[in-house]
Image: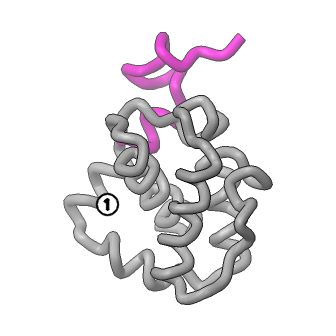
């Protein structure tokens, strides 16, 4: 599993918890504001990531990289995310998240296709 996939899966879980959403409803390519992420939630999530990574992150992370996919790519390319990888090392949890992310990342080929179809 790539570093980007690990962080993407973890971000989906964190976003779902922060906003009280069902993980399966999160499309990693959609803007985070679509799910109701506001500045307070964004700063809280950035703080949580900083705590785990023991690194300072830009407070504007989720505005500069406005989707789970883009934020995960930025984090994977610029930070050592091994602490997050360890936090998500449960095989069952990873498998469930991978299935969810795969279903939402490729909506046309998934059971969620009609919910996430693009114009």
Total marks shown come to 1
Is 25 above or below relative to 75?
A: above
Q: Position of residue 56 (x, y in %)?
A: 66, 83
For this view, does 30 lie left or right of residue 51?
right
41 in the magenta segment = no
Q: Residue at x 71, y 61 (%)?
A: 61
Q: Nearer the viewer, residue 97 or 22?
A: 22
For this view, does 10 lie left or right of residue 72?
left
113 in the magenta segment = yes
Q: How would you rate the neighbour count of disc 1 (Cα within 10 Å): few for under 14, some for 14-19, many for 20 or more? A: some
Q: Residue at x 41, y 50 (%)?
A: 18
Q: Position of residue 105 (x, y in %)?
A: 54, 37
Q: Nearer the viewer, residue 31 or 33?
A: 33
- The image quadrant that residue 3 belongs to is bottom right
Q: Nearer the viewer, residue 67 or 106?
A: 67
Q: Position of residue 112 (x, y in %)?
A: 42, 21
Is 20 above or below relative to 54?
A: above
The residue most toward the front is: 40
Is 31 above or below relative to 68?
A: above
What span is colored magenta in the figure?
100-119
Read off the residue under disc 1.
94
Quadrant position of the C terminus in the picture: top right
Q: Residue at x 35, y 50 (%)?
A: 17
Is 101 above or below relative to 118?
A: below
Q: Residue at x 52, y 25 (%)?
A: 107
The residue most toward the bottom is: 54
For this view, does 106 lie left or right of residue 31?
left
């Amino acid at each position: 599993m790539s570093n980007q996939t690990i962080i993407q899966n973890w971000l989906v879980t964190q976003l779902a918890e922060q906003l009280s959403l069902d993980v399966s409803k999160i499309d990693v390519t959609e803007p985070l504001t679509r799910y109701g992420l506001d500045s307070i939630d964004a700063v809280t999530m950035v703080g949580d990531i900083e705590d785990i990574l023991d690194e300072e992150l830009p407070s504007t992370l989720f505005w500069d990289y406005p989707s789970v996919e883009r934020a995960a790519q930025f984090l994977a390319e610029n930070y050592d995310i091994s602490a997050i990888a360890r936090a998500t090392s449960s095989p069952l949890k990873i498998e469930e998240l991978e299935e969810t992310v795969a279903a939402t990342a490729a909506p046309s080929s998934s059971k969620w296709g009609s919910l996430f179809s693009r114009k």
